[in-house]
């Protein structure tokens, strides 16, 4: 039986991103922006490849991402730099 870490390592950031519909991400981000306060620090647990962390940071939210998958965190760091 595969562990969650093995599953996400095998799936990778691209595979995970392909499982998410862009319209869902957009509506979920809109919801998060309604309930989150830019004045507070935010921790995105299980942030994966930064699907929410990066766009919220770009909009001025003080947000940090944390994930068990080093590969997904590496992808998030690369995308955040770009």
Image (cartoon, rainbow, N blue to C red):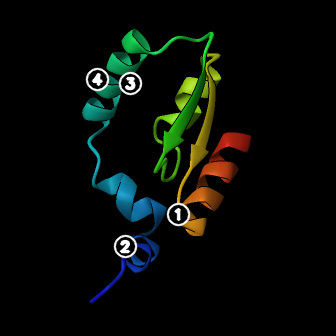
> Could you tell me which quadrant the C terminus lies in?
top right
Residues at marks 1 and 4 touching, judged by CB atoms closer than 8 Å = no
Which residue is most to the bottom? 1
Q: Is residue 24 left or right of residue 47?
A: left
Residues at marks 1 and 2 touching, judged by CB atoms closer than 8 Å = yes
What mark, if any, has residue 68 been given in the picture?
A: 1
What mark, if any, has residue 27 been given in the picture?
A: 4
Residue at mark 3 to residue at mark 4: CA–CA distance: 5 Å
Q: Is residue 4 above or below residue 25?
A: below
Please tell me which residue is depicted at 53% across the width and 44% down the height of the picture: 50
Name the front one of labels 1 and 4. Answer: 1
What mark, if any, has residue 4 been given in the picture?
A: 2
Q: Earlier in the sequence, mark 2 or mark 3?
A: 2
Please tell me which residue is depicted at 58% across the width and 12% down the height of the picture: 38
Q: Is residue 82 visible?
A: no
Q: Secondary structure at mark 2?
A: helix
Residues at marks 4 and 2 touching, judged by CB atoms closer than 8 Å = no
Q: Earlier in the sequence, mark 4 or mark 2?
A: 2
- Horizontal and vertical percent for residue 66? 57, 50
Q: Is residue 80 visible?
A: yes
What mark, if any, has residue 29 been given in the picture?
A: 3
Q: Is residue 8 above or below residue 62?
A: below
- Horizontal and vertical percent for residue 73? 60, 57
């Amino acid at each position: 039986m595969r562990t969650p870490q093995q599953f996400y390592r095998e799936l990778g950031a691209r595979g995970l991103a392909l499982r998410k519909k862009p319209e869902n991400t957009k509506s979920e981000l809109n919801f998060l922006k309604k309930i989150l306060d830019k004045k507070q620090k935010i921790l995105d647990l299980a942030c994966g490849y930064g699907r929410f962390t990066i766009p919220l940071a770009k909009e001025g939210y003080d947000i940090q991402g944390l994930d068990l998958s080093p590969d997904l965190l590496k992808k998030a760091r690369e995308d955040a730099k770009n």
